[in-house]
């Protein structure tokens, strides 16, 4: 199965500095290894920094796509790929040292069970926030929790499933909106979280906005 990494960023107030994105990318590589990578860059709000920011981002990859918003980039990432699975990663996260499976391990389970959204949690796996349901399960060496919440925190999606059935739920709007709220409000969609109930947070938000 083909897996690709998409990093989503924007011309934030610290652009054209790329240290936030670079730290996120380095953390991903340390955790999972190297995969084909694309960067989707919303040109707002500091449009005047766009060309310099894009030039600096080319130190990570030359595959940079300029977009109008996060949701615009998200849809483009689905449509501009032939991969089976996409790792969707905003630019201000770091992985904790407690993920013990490869992406191949995880996507094999996703494929076998028809899972279309698999995420890593920024907090301990407990009923909190939008996670109003948690059902612990196990398959082929992978322990996970089923939840109602399709959070935009670092996650893996079944690209073909999204392309054919889910992308029409997403609304292209300015800024960082238009994805998770739109997917969650329909109520029938499910996601999977890495780890058992009570498993410690697997990611840390470095919050690039600040």
Image (cartoon, rainbow, N blue to C red):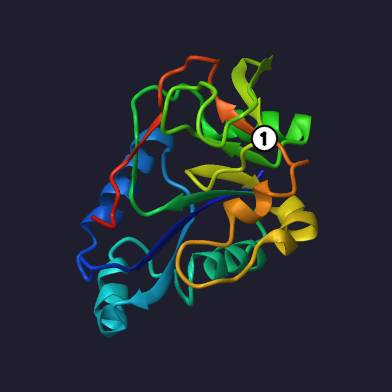
Q: Is residue 34 visible?
A: yes
Q: Which residue is mark 1?
A: 148
SS class, disc 1: loop
Q: Position of residue 98 (x, y in %)?
A: 39, 22
Q: Is residue 79 left or right of residue 199?
A: right
Sort mark 1 into few (<14), some (14-19) or many (20+) by Cα contacts within 10 Å. some
To which quarter of the image does residue 171 belong?
Answer: bottom right
Kindly identify the residue that appears in the image at 79 percent across and 56 percent down.
165
Kindly identify the residue that appears in the image at 43 percent across and 36 percent down.
32
User: Relative to the observer, which residue lies in front, 26 or 169?
Assistant: 169
Q: Quadrant of the N terminus?
A: top right
Quarter-of-image position of residue 146? top right
Expressed as whole percent of the image width and height from the top left, the position of residue 23 reads 26, 48
In the picture, the quarter occupied by the C terminus is bottom left
Looking at the image, residue 104 lies above or below residue 175: above
| Coordinates of residue 55 in the picture (x, y in percent) | 28, 75
**Most foreground residue, 181 or 53:** 181
Q: Left or right: where does residue 70 sit relative to residue 204? A: right
Q: Is residue 84 visible?
A: no
- At 58% from the left and 62% from the top, the residue drawn is 178
| Residue at 77% across, 30% down | 113
Give the percent coordinates (x, y) of residue 144: 60, 21
Snapshot quadrant of residue 63: bottom left
* Front one among 12 and 59: 12
């Amino acid at each position: 199965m083909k897996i690709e990494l998409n990093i989503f960023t924007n011309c934030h107030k610290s652009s054209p500095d790329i240290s936030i994105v670079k730290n996120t990318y380095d953390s991903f590589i340390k955790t999972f290894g190297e995969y084909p990578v694309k960067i989707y860059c919303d040109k707002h709000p500091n449009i005047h920094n766009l060309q310099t920011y894009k030039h600096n981002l080319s130190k990570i990859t030359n595959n940079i796509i300029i977009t109008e918003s996060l949701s615009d980039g998200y849809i483009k990432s689905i449509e501009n790929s032939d991969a089976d699975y996409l790792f969707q990663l905003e630019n201000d996260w770091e992985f904790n040292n407690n993920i013990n499976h490869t992406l191949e391990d995880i996507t094999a389970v996703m494929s076998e069970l028809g899972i279309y959204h698999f995420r890593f949690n920024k907090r301990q796996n407990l009923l909190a926030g939008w996670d109003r349901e948690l059902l612990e399960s196990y398959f082929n060496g992978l322990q996970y929790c089923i939840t109602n919440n399709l959070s935009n925190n670092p996650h893996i999606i079944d690209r073909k499933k999204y392309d054919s059935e889910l992308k029409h739920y997403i609304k292209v709007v300015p800024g960082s909106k238009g994805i998770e709220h739109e997917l969650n409000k329909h109520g029938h969609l499910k996601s999977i979280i890495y780890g058992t109930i009570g498993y410690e947070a697997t990611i840390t938000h470095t919050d690039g906005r600040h």
